[in-house]
Image (cartoon, rainbow, N blue to C red):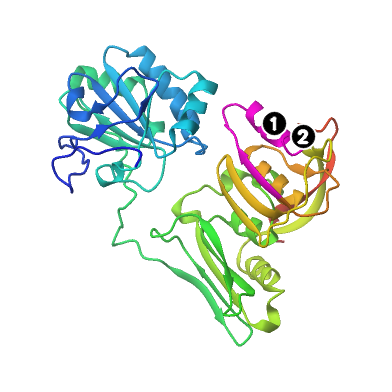
Amino acid sequence: MISIISCKKENEIAEIGKQVPDYTFKNILNSKEEQISTRDLKGKIVILEFWATWCGPCIPAMRKLDSLQTEFKNDLEVITISSENKERLEKFIKSTNTTLKIVSDTSHLSNFKYKVIPHSIIIDKNGIVRAITNPENINKEVINKLISKNEISLDLKDDFYINPELKVKTIKSISNQNYRIELKGYDQKKRGGSKILKDTEGNINGIEMWNSTIPRLYQTLFDIASPSRMIYKDSLNEQDFPYKKEHQYNMTIEVSNKFQKKWRKIGIDFLNENFDVNAKIGIDTLSCYVLKNVDNTIKKSTSNSSEYMFMGTILNAKKIKMSQLAEYLENFTSIPVLDKTNLNGEYDIELEWQAEDPKTLHTELKKYGLKFEKSDKKLPVEIMEIYRKK
């Protein structure tokens, strides 16, 4: 157990307008204090920030909160909470020199409920919860208003709210002996993502895609590594496909044994037929990063089965190809990453690095004799063109 709760009621949860739950945080890092109780923080504005080192949006939020803590040091107490272990968090502290108090805690969800991070709770000087929101809504104007008027109004972040009036709309459905396709609108009960479907014998026979924009649907079906390979044509741009409800779709493709190798093409043809915006694969010459084999340190995998799991900057993989490692790295760049290792086998790779300190990635790759650097010239890259249907 990483932390211990101290609370009056098991079901006491943080709610706007109510007293903050009486909760004691332990395992406090970057502080002389051994524990902090929420009830002992009255007299100051408190921000509880729930985050993780592997969470992309969390890192800039942490920098902003650090700046606010410095500016309002006599009026504000920022406590940041992560479910990660102390060792991981201590690396973050060392690499960023943050002044924020950081807590390693795995039990707080019984009192502070959320599904998605970053997640912020703002508490006034009297211990009353004044906002449950996203950290992007917090700034010095908000803090000044709380100091002077003791009240604010910020957009509510409620990861559990279901609007009973918002129904899932079926846009088109096809079902025959060869395949089944369903295209639906936004579904508030689902998050963005996808899941490969398999038949009873374990063969891949389709996919489910959730709350995805049109480019994202195409990207998944074309198996394009990242949005950095999307090229917009005909005056289209990324802003034409905002991540809003009216631009999100859910799609299911499931095929018979006869069409198991064609489900991607069936899905692409369906999208091309039913949307005014289409996509196709092409080749372009772009700036990119390259993954290189420096000294042949890495050995081929002897694992019995393949495995691929990553949580941000933590990767645990067995029996993967170098192209898959390049695709993983592309999650953290604004330009494509190409595999130039000339390694054709399958390998076991474990990485744990800090996004705020790129040197830690290079150190991790060096253990395998690998090098990651920007190419000194533009290279041919497989891209996906998004264009208006003629």
Q: Is residue 221 visible?
A: yes
Q: Amino acid at mark 2?
A: Lys
- Asked whether residue 365 is drawn in magenta, I would say yes
Q: Are marks 1 and 2 in contact (CB under 8 Å)?
A: yes
Report x, y in % for residue 42.
Answer: 17, 22
- Asked whether residue 74 is drawn in magenta, I would say no
Q: What span is colored magenta in the figure?
A: 348-370
- Per the image, label 1 sits on a secondary structure element best described as helix
Vertical side of 148 occupied by 166: above or below: below
Report x, y in % for residue 67.
Answer: 42, 17
Marks 1 and 2, Cα distance to the nearest angstrom? 7 Å
- Per the image, label 2 sits on a secondary structure element best described as strand
Residue plotted at (58% across, 39% down) = 313
Label disc, if present, on residue 371 of the rendered structure: 2
Residue plotted at (34% across, 49% down) = 159
Q: Quadrant of the N terminus?
A: top left
Q: Is residue 230 visible?
A: no
Label disc, if present, on residue 362 of the rendered structure: 1
Vertical side of 23 occupied by 339: above or below: below
Q: Is residue 167 left or right of residue 150?
A: right
Task: Pick the residue in front: 152 or 44.
Answer: 44
Q: Amino acid at mark 1?
A: His
So how many labels did they put on this image? 2
Q: Quadrant of the C terminus?
A: bottom right
